[in-house]
Image (cartoon, coloured by chain):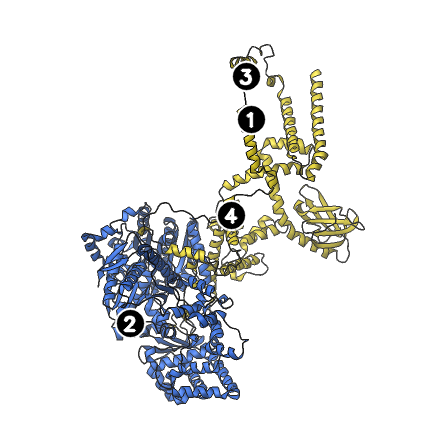
Amino acid sequence: MKLNIDGLLVWFPYDFIYPEQFSYMLELKRTLDAKGHGVLEMPSGTGKTISLLSLIVAYQRAFPLEVTKLIYCSRTVPEIEKVVEELRRLMEFYAKETGESNNFLSLALSSRKNLCIHPEVSSLRFGKEVDGKCHSLTASYVRAQRHSNPNLPTCRFYEEFDAVGRQVPLPAGIYNLDDLKDFGRRKGWCPYYLARYAILHANIVVYSYHYLLDPKIADLVSKELAKNSVVVFDEAHNIDNVCIDSMSVNITRRTLDRCQTNVDTLQNTIQKIKETDAAKLKAEYRRLVEGLKEANVARETDVYLANPVLPDEILREAVPGTIRTAEHFVGFLRRFLEYLKSRLRVHHVVQESAPQFLKDIFDKVCIDRKPLRFCAERLQSLLRTLEIADIADFSSVTLISNFATLVSTYSQGFTLIIEPFEDRTPTIANPVLHFSCMDPSIAIKPVFQRFQSVIITSGTLSPLDVYPKILDFRPVTMASFTMTLARTCLCPLIVGRGNDQVALSSKFETREDFAVIRNYGNLLLEMSAVVPDGIVAFFTSYVYMENIVASWYEQGILENIQRNKLIFIETPDAAETSMALEKYQEACENGRGAILLSVARGKVSEGIDFVHHFGRAVIMFGVPYVYTQSRILKARLEYLRDQFQIRENDFLTFDAMRHAAQCVGRAIRGKTDYGLMIFADKRYARADKRGKLPRWIQEHISDGSLNLTVDESVQRSKHFLRQMAQPFRQEDQLGLSLLTLEQLQSEETLKRIAQIAHQT
Amino acid sequence: MASLSEEVLLVVKKVRQRKQDGTMYLMAERIAWCPEGKDRFTVSHPYADIRCQKISPDGKAKIQLQLVLHTGESTTFHFSNDSTALKDREAAKELLQQLLPRFKKKANKELEEKNRMLQEDPVLFQMYKDLVVSKVISAEEFWTNRLGGVNNTDSVVQNNKQEVGISGAFLADIRPQTDGCNGLKYNLTADIIESIFRTYPAVKQKYSENVPHNLTEKEFWTCFFQSHYFHRDRINTGTQDIFSECAKQDEKGLKSMVIQGVKNPLVDLLSLEDKTLDEGYGNGLTRASTSSTNKTIKDNSNAAIIKRFNHHSAMVLAAGSRRGETAAEQASETSSTDGNSRDSDLFQPPVKKAKLQEAIEYEDLQRENGQKTVALNLKKSYRYAHGPVPLQSQQYTSSQDIINSISCIQHEMTNYKPNLTQVLSSAAATSAIAALSPGGVLMQGGSQQAINQMVPTDIQGELKHLYVAAGELLRHFWSCFPVNSPFLEEKLTGHLEEMLQTAYSKLHTWQTRQMTMRKT
């Protein structure tokens, strides 16, 4: 249908529209008009993606100079592909309605592992191996060597692309990952480099967070994207963790050992080259004197060698003289390495800031701050000069030099913690140096600064005001939309007591309590008898789940559950879990019914949807607090308190509740779907926990369902499920949670819709 | 009788049978023995015919191996090579032990089927008695003709019968009870055993290998329950246990399932993440769970439980849907034969595309556009368009022939004139029929007694049997036509004629006996 969103003509590829989609688009339009950033929360299953795409595409068509590009970031590969498919649907609708094919170029970009078509390289299993192999075939100096020795292996797809691929732009259209591969095969071009090249002139790019947030990748891939782009972070409820992860480094003794071998190899190679080709080293030296810029001619294939710090932090000067010659630099690395080794030989935990560390290193081994800052750049240059093809082997020394650059660049927002052993096993020495980023705003800052509009959106972003705080930006719009429902298709219940009135809680003191474990078992058992098809149960951590499963087994609870449903359990091994998941779906599909026991914060809770009969009930056993004894977390909490005035408890609860909301939200993926959401912990009843759940869940928790016993919740579930099992037709929704074009044009509805958006 | 294409698995020399020296051969499908100096087997038993093997006790002077057949006959071999007799016997025994169960299942199934049919159908049973027991035709011949036809109708019935799945908790149903004197009693029903076998094929294999040669059924199950296999801490399985192998096989099965990967890309956790952080980067918050070096035994046994539940559920699920799965697998096999291996990405897209489409579908946002249809997926569209092509087209008339014959018939029809002068009037015809019916004018004169009252029932019965038997023979006779194979020809000219002769003479003797009985 054709919509009028605040004066903008938007083509929407469906016959009906949800009211919240309409208000979402209104809000989005306002954000784009203001050229500012926005935070928008809308429940999953209400068509967030298609609303976003419809509006932004319409905006791009109406104001082609204002918004040239849409950069859509999502988290997982299936998510990325889903977005592209929705986009394809939209574009097909455009073509059908307007009768003209528009010249939009949209494509997905993913890692080499998902795009490579080289027969040997693509058969490798791990992304790292694929990257390494590709690099050894296509790195600039490898290719240069081939001029003198044509027998070296090559990647014909890259060669072909390099020869002709850049001259003709990718024809307009929608390219999903498989389409890119197809196209690549037909033309004989490397799809990965084709895609990386094409994103520069594409209208819509869909890729994963890392391509924008991780400076090691962003610098190479996304550097030249136009400033007047709109960036969308979908499923952004965990965006702070992604930011932090991309800037943090961990160093173990094993890293240092490997680094030692790396340095030895470097030394030997330098020695060899010196004997055969001393001119090469001299040339490098000269280049370094002249300045980095010259040495750093953009070479797209040298991916491994990117700077770990953000672009505006990189010094634009010449490398200091102390590390300019290759031997000096290796000596420098050796000294640095020895220093790190001595630091790891501690017997107690050390925590210090970056300036403290720099002072200490200067006192002990006389290493200055400035050469440290250039460490990463210098190593890049050296590796390139030495023409080392197998860069993957040098990951340890790269890590160390990245750490050096990071620690000397940022004096704020980072902490350095050295732990001599793990907390659980104090007798086994396993020293680790954590250089941990505590401020997610560091990594995302350039994104906010550079692009005119950044939209942060997800199904669960409550409470909304936390995100602008911890990411340090000023949004022009913040809105939370609820799900308008013709029937209450979600039923959140808070089970606080067992039938014997024992308080249910996963808190530390009662963790081992048999009464609690037994009552949890009873809850699952009773639910397995009542709920049809699939039930998903989440535990707070893997260890906790293991213990509970073991004691359920001993008490015979699992056997009784097996009478009702099959049991599948998440394991730490991803392949095994995938198999369990598939079998789980199969069991739901053929009517036998199954239970999946899983872990909050695990892969299942973050990436797998349980639509319709795959998840008729989600049970959240306990509140999924993060492991609070971790020193890194403590440091981060402290930092949040000092910098952003966020109290520790508030943040911990916020973090726990967003994960709980993610878990239970897995079951509802649309208005025709329905499911029970059972929070099995009495602490959920408290206002400070409950208040942090997304609004669309919160408003269905009645006061009567705050502290139920197992029996009461079973009764309510039965009632709910019986209601939901009645036929539900489109007409039932129409006018309430589903609108036709005519309904949308009436004043009354518009007024009603205006109330849906929850402004903060 | 030379074994041209048969694979000889074992040759044992110096084996005596009926006091005659000779050589024993174990072949792929049968065991055979030929006397020394001759080149043909005088003893040959297909494995399927052998019910069991028996061996002489260890202490005895004669080292023997006895084969008991299903028919009750037995053959005894005496291993007479002094030095290696025991070893030879063991080797033969071992091999037979492995081979017999394989054929046994087949043979047993057939026998059971035959038995069932005979029990269910008294007429068939009588016929069997008349024809086979009295040696008119051989049992084999009787069944070849019978099983084929019956099986066809039978399999339809079986297909309609819904297969019962397995309860997920069948192991939980075996509640151990104390029997009062320090023992445990497990109650096993046939259903549970069936469930165990279907869920754990490895146990079934052990069962058919060991029962009843090595263990009695009871001993086997005692062993099973005592074994760690049944209990949770499977990590400590000893090597002497016969079930330790099962545990290993299960492990292997699980691993192969995992390696096979998942078909649905949306649940493949391995390829979920687009760009994983390199080793050494990241916040390290997840590190605690990844360090697996120092796991306690308790952790390990917990992990074993979890693994076992996953495996158990997968097996139960597979056992329930095995039939459907094989069909599905075949389908996927055929579709993957277009030149590409399974994991190549050319094979993936259809599943992936469908799943993606499914995932982005908002059914309530669209107008319902009628019934959803399933697209016809044609492997070879020309076959759909043309229908099955006859293999021997010369047997069929060409379209020209058909047109010719039609025109011919049409021509005759136009020229057809009914010759009504020679036809009775309808009234006369009905009166004639009425007169000839029982109670009619023409039937008055004869004896009123129906034949079934005249003849005593036992004679009737005998006559019926003779009739049925003769009918069966005739069926055999007619089933030989058209004679298109030398075998049929031989059957027809050879013993079938003989058989008919026998049947006829049987009837004849019966007749004469009746005659003489009546006379006396």
Confirm whether residue B500 shows in the render. yes
Amino acid type indicated by mark 4: Tyr
The C terminus of chain A appears in which quarter of the rendering? bottom left
Q: Which mark identifies residue B412?
A: 1
**Chain letter for blue?**
A
Query: Which of the 4 quarters of the picture holds residue A479?
Result: bottom left
Q: Which mark identifies residue B382?
A: 4
- Do the residues at discs 4 and 2 belong to one chain? no
Please identify, in this view, whether the residue under mark 4 or under mark 2 is nearer the observer. 4
Do labels 2 and 3 touch, CB within 8 Å?
no
Q: CA distance from mark 2 to mark 3?
A: 108 Å
Badge 4: chain ID:
B
Crowding at dot 4, Cα within 10 Å, few <14 / some 14-19 / many 20+, comes out as: few
Do labels 1 and 3 touch, CB within 8 Å?
no
Residue A257 in the image: state x and y as whole percent: 47, 79
For marks 1 and 3 on the same chain, the one whose residue lies earlier in the sequence: 1
For marks 1 and 4 on the same chain, the one whose residue lies earlier in the sequence: 4
Crowding at dot 2, Cα within 10 Å, few <14 / some 14-19 / many 20+, comes out as: many
Q: Residue furthest right?
A: B37
Name the residue tied to disc 2.
A448
Badge 1: chain ID:
B
